[in-house]
Image (cartoon, helix red, strand yellow):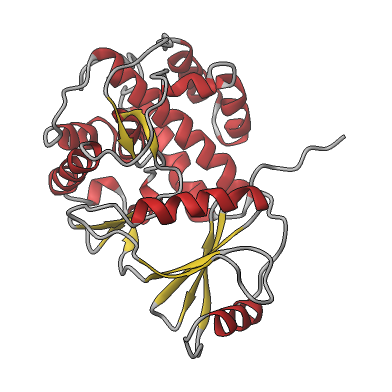
Amino acid sequence: MSVEPPWRAEYELEAEQVREVVSQNTDLVVSDVSFLGAGWDFYNWLVNKSWVFRFPKRHSDIDALVHEYRILNQLVLPVATPRIEFWIDRPNNFHKPFAGYAYLPGSSLLGYESDSCDLTAIGKTIGEVLTVLHQQSLTRPLVPVDPLSLWREGFDEVVTKAQPDLDHEIEQQVRNALSSYHMRERTKHQVTTHNDLGVEHILMHDHAKVSGLIDWADTATANGFVDFAGIWAWGGDRALTATIDHYFVDPSREDFAQIRVHGLCYALEQIAYGRSINDEELHTASKHWIQRRVRDGEIDDVYAKP
């Protein structure tokens, strides 16, 4: 029996349907509709070049939208975050709740090469923002397990999904790095985290200025260093050091290992996901991250201080 991929949506959504649904459920006069993209959980559409409407792709994603709605109503950060202006929990002629946010200008860090960016400036902003975020109590306490326990039995599967895009030597070095990680039964530094801070969720105005953070549906209490995995995968130890220099807690050796191994898993997942949805930018960029981290020797010892 075949198993549906976890990102497979329960329905398709076209521009004309978005136009009708938004028109019927808001006071907007819809003149322009364009597709922004689809993540694991939501379709994202730009309406009138001013509003982003998010539609859950599956019934199970409705809770994530409700959670994001609650978080964003409380969140205060020194960079822009989405602000919900339209909350439609019982729409007319549509089968799922949806939300509308004021559009945040900028392009995702995914589209930037780390070598062309001011890592000091980017790291300073992200480190300061994470300091503010991690000192807010927005999510309920959880048992402080190792965040990588989700992959405890799945490191091999994560690599296997990306294997078609890795040469043998890189694959072996990645497997060695993952297998060197010692899972912790309990971790300290439990805080409110973004919990999905891949570079696709970091908005930029240019090669130095972080303008906003988006996609807060996975916000949760976790070890605070989960929010450093994406920036490390993208920019390696240099970007990680620049960020930690402006953060309020110093990582331990175990935290550095967690960041790097989590970053590897994030990049490997992005390789496979990008390939599966024919997103060439995501697929190529994440493959390059893995190659660069291996080439620069940054996973030879995942426990090493940068």
Quarter occupied by residue 252: top left
- Observer-nearest residue: 285 or 25? 25
Quarter occupied by residue 230: top left
Q: Is residue 128 above or below residue 38?
A: above
Counting from the top left corner in percent of width and height, residue 242 is at 16, 36
Q: Which residue is drawn at 66% across and 78% down?
A: 17
Residue 40 makes an appearance in the image: no
Q: Residue at x 35, y 25 (%)?
A: 260
Q: Which residue is drawn at 53% across and 81% down?
A: 33
Left or right of 93 on screen, residue 254: left
Counting from the top left corner in percent of width and height, residue 259 is at 34, 26
Counting from the top left corner in percent of width and height, residue 14 is at 66, 74
Counting from the top left corner in percent of width and height, residue 266 is at 46, 35
Left or right of 61 on screen, residue 72: left
- Observer-nearest residue: 11 or 253? 11
- Observer-nearest residue: 108 or 218? 218
The tally of labels here is 0
Q: In this view, does 295 lie above or below 10?
A: above
| Quadrant containing the C terminus in the rendered view | top left
Q: In this view, does 79 lie above or below 160?
A: below
| Quadrant containing the N terminus in the rendered view | top right
Left or right of 55 on screen, residue 129: left
Residue 127 makes an appearance in the image: yes
Left or right of 78 on screen, residue 200: right
Q: Which residue is drawn at 53% across and 17% down?
A: 152
